[in-house]
Amino acid sequence: MRFSIVGGTRLSGTVKISGAKNSVLKLMAMSLMANDRCVIRNVPRILDVQTMKGVIEALGARVEWHDDVMEITPPEHLGTEAPEELVRGMRASIQIMGPLLAKVGEVHIAQPGGCSIGHRPVDFHLRGFRAMGAEVEERYGYMRARADKLKGATVFLDFPSVGATENLMAAAALAEGTTVICNAAREPEIVDQQNFLNLMGAKVRGAGTGQIVVEGVKELAGVDYTVIPDRIEAGTMMVAAAITGGHVTLQDVEPDHLGFLVAKLREMGVSVEISRNQIDCYADRPIRGATVRSMPYPGFATDLQPSIAALASVAEGCSVLIETIYSNRFHYLEEMRKMGAKVIIEHSTAVIRGVDRLTGTNVCAPDLRGGAALVLCALAADGHTVVDNIELIDRGYEQFEQKLSGLGARIIRTE
Ligand code: UD1
């Protein structure tokens, strides 16, 4: 499937931000640990959620999903083997490991598939499970972990990995004794996991700081929980406003999670006004280039690097993008070049010299966030752009083209 986009319209209007993909997937996995039904609200209709639904259903959970409300009822006896085709298609499936190990003492799962943005091993997750007493085997592309009863441990992460922090928090929630996760990730999604777990009866503290302490409890109850807003979708929409010289109001957003992006956009000359759950973003003067270094939270989010590159491609002067999280995130820049972007890539650094106008052509989404950034370029380009392979964008953006056309963009989906 592809998007067909005619550029040149200034976006204006109001857009509602959906629930956070990177939180809801983990909450779904953690629901498997509950003794009864969990209700999750503000669930976005995106492909990755559909995939995770398939994974937890295959483990025996009953899932009902109406509008943005998902009800998950774990079975009496959870399965221990995750379906390979779903796991290979979505790396976040790895997040069932901690919950299953803690709840049933066993999990069998394929190594998650390769990723176009770089090498993404799961060694921190496995090292943490081993420290908690699990036996972990890795053979023929599969991982099997077993533990009669996980034991609390102090775990040091070599890097503040989001997924490892969440997987270990989940495992620790039902382990015996106290677990300390040192050099933990500090993303808002981690705080969301802590709030969800604590509402289930877990004893987790420290999320949002570099050290998380989890005192294991014997069981976890069902919950009714609302997912935080998706800060990456919000950031993408803010750039959509800026790159088209438009004026967009984002609703149902959490401005506190977007501090770095807001500062960077202001530095680039974009106007951003913040009220409680709302952000007004507009471009009423020329956009300037900037230096942007992706970092773990609260640094600049790597997932927003492609969007900021789109803006840099039409900004005045040069921008420098330094990627510190992934080894190979710049594939989308090759596609932007086809639209006239002036880019030099050197290892993990890209230098972008802004041009007056990009021109529409045929491009292909190389990954989820890179694909969204190509759509942003197309909205600002002269003429007609076709963005192919948009299934990747559907993984993480709910009703992307409907939301953009609601703001005046000329975008349609075609087979
Ligand atoms: C999550 C997000 C992803 C985001 C990323 C960084 C989800 C579903 N995805 O991914 O959108 O880009 O955080 O903010 O939430 N690493 C290892 N060994 C490990 C684990 C990670 O070397 O065991 C490395 C990775 O290769 C990567 C870095 O650590 O270079 C960060 O990865 P991590 O924070 O774990 O990202 P994810 O949780 O996979």
Image (cartoon, rainbow, N blue to C red):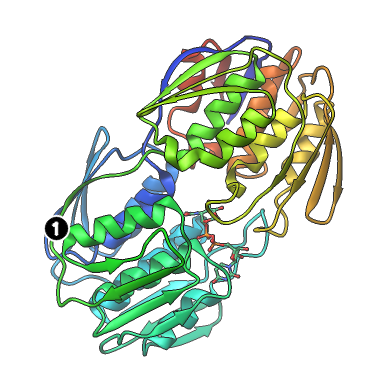
Q: Quadrant of the N terminus?
A: top right
Q: Quadrant of the C terminus?
A: top right
Q: At which x and y percent is residue 229?
A: 38, 38
Asked whether residue 80 appears in the rendered view, the answer is no
Amino acid type at circle 1 is Gly
Residue at the image position 75 percent from the left and 31 percent from the top: 312
Up the image or down, 201 lies above or below 12; here it is below
Mark 1 surroundings within 10 Å by alpha-carbon count, few (fewer than 14), some (14 through 19), many (20 or more): many
Q: Quadrant of residue 215?
A: bottom left
Q: At which x and y percent is residue 376?
A: 64, 26
Q: At which x and y percent is residue 210?
A: 46, 66
Residue at the image position 63 percent from the left and 45 percent from the top: 367
Q: At which x and y percent is residue 175?
A: 26, 81
**Residue 104 or residue 205, whichever sits in front:** 205
Q: Quadrant of residue 271?
A: top right
Up the image or down, 249 lies above or below 86; here it is above
Residue at the image position 17 percent from the left and 61 percent from the top: 200
Q: Secondary structure at mark 1?
A: loop
Left or right, residue 355 beside residue 273: right
**Residue 338 or residue 54, whichever sits in front:** 338
Up the image or down, 382 lies above or below 22; here it is above
Which residue in the structure is indicated by mark 1?
222
**Residue 226 or residue 50, whichever sits in front:** 226
**Residue 367 or residue 241, whichever sits in front:** 241
Q: Quadrant of residue 121?
A: bottom right
